[in-house]
Amino acid sequence: MELYDTVIIGGGPAGLSAGIYAARAQLKLVLLEKLAPGGQIAVTELVENYPGFPDGVMGAELASQMEAQARKFALPIESAEVRSVTVEGDIKIVKTDKAEYRARTLIVASGTNPRRLGIPGEMKYLGRGVSTCATCDAPLYRGRTVAVVGGGDSAIQEALFIAKFVDKCYVIHRRDELRAQKILQDRALAEPKIEFVWNSTVPRIVGDEGVTEVRVTNKLTGDESGLTVDGVFIFVGLLPNIDFLDGMIEADEKGFLLADQNMETNIPGIYAAGDVRSKILRQVATAVSDGATAAFDLEKHLD
Ligand code: NAP
């Protein structure tokens, strides 16, 4: 069986950046991606804080330019879902739904998944009024009323996007202060279509064929009430995509992979890059940096 210099798991900005560096270094490699390359930015409307684009850049456009750049350097990208990773001596074995790969090094750039609230109605109405992707679903709610749950960058950025389509967007947050960046907060507070519902949690989502109501509990009074909505967008944080690792790599208390300053994990030759890594800032800029660093360091490891 072929032995790769490296296998990259994940085709978001971290994986593509690692791929560009490693392909330019003429390593024998493959990038495995279960969906389309691009990761989270492929479903982000506008990326405003990635240097080089004074007017911002559409997320899908940035994703496709990154992919085009990687393909220009002949990075092989295969569509496959990774099921497991094992280590035999110095060799890393990656099993996907289609094939098995053996490599001397591995870059885990598998990103994150949206966290769920775990409340009644959430899974029942997923795709029928409950969504975790505003870029995908906000246009379906033109002229209607929706609720966003969460108070971080995702919730506020996506609420601003959703407000372009809907008549009204409630933002239900469990505290009276947002976690999101100040610039996003200011924009959301100035958006007349957004109404904040502070100090509140969502105990359940109610509907018939689709969502009709979101139940809201005021944490200060304990009172429960209902908001009539056509859809609920949930942005309450991210969970790392690490199931296929079966706990083999050291992680922080939330499951994000621990790596040193060269992105190497506790297992020599296995690197973590991008949102899946334990870090203080999850941005395109830090993801591409992680990917580049990992690709650079693994060359030393191969030597
Ligand atoms: P996050 O920063 O972890 O925020 C999650 C939000 O959901 C918080 O406001 C949190 O409330 C709330 N929450 C968590 N669990 C909850 C529950 N069970 N019930 C109700 N509310 C709950 O997640 P994120 O917004 O998805 O962002 C993830 C990372 O991506 C961050 O590093 C962020 O900076 C980055 N990001 C950046 C941008 C950008 O730069 N434009 C855009 C999107 C994401 P508390 O505040 O009370 O904890």
Image (cartoon, helix red, strand yellow):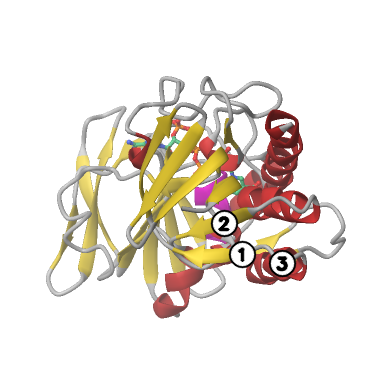
Q: Secondary structure at mark 3?
A: loop
Crowd tier of the residue under label 1, counting other residues whose Cα lies within 10 Å: few below 14, some 14–19, many 20 or above: some
For badge 2, the amino acid type reads Leu
Q: Which residue is mark 3?
A: 74
> Is the C-beta of the residue carrying label 3 under 8 Å from the nearest atom of ligand 1?
no
> Is the C-beta of the residue carrying label 2 under 8 Å from the nearest atom of ligand 1?
no
Q: Are marks 1 and 3 in contact (CB under 8 Å)?
A: yes
Is any part of residue 167 visible from this angle?
A: no
Q: Quadrant of residue 43?
A: bottom right
Real-space Cα distance between discs 1 and 3?
A: 6 Å
Q: Is residue 157 magenta?
A: yes
Magenta region, residue range: 153-160
Real-space Cα distance between discs 2 and 1?
A: 6 Å
**Residue shown at 69% from the left, 72% from the top:** 61
For badge 1, the amino acid type reads Pro
Q: Secondary structure at mark 1?
A: loop
Q: Are marks 2 and 1 in contact (CB under 8 Å)?
A: yes
Q: Which mark is residue 76?
A: 1
Q: Is residue 124 magenta?
A: no
| Quarter placement of the C terminus | top right
Crowd tier of the residue under label 3, counting other residues whose Cα lies within 10 Å: few below 14, some 14–19, many 20 or above: some
Query: Residue 36, image x and y in percent?
Result: 51, 68
Q: Is residue 90 above or below residue 32?
A: above
Q: Nearer the viewer, residue 115 or 105?
A: 105
Compared across the picture, whether 76 is left or right of 80 comes to: right
Q: Nearer the viewer, residue 66 or 89?
A: 89
Query: Residue 21, image x and y in percent?
Result: 76, 50
Q: Which residue is mark 2?
A: 31
Q: Residue furthest left?
A: 208
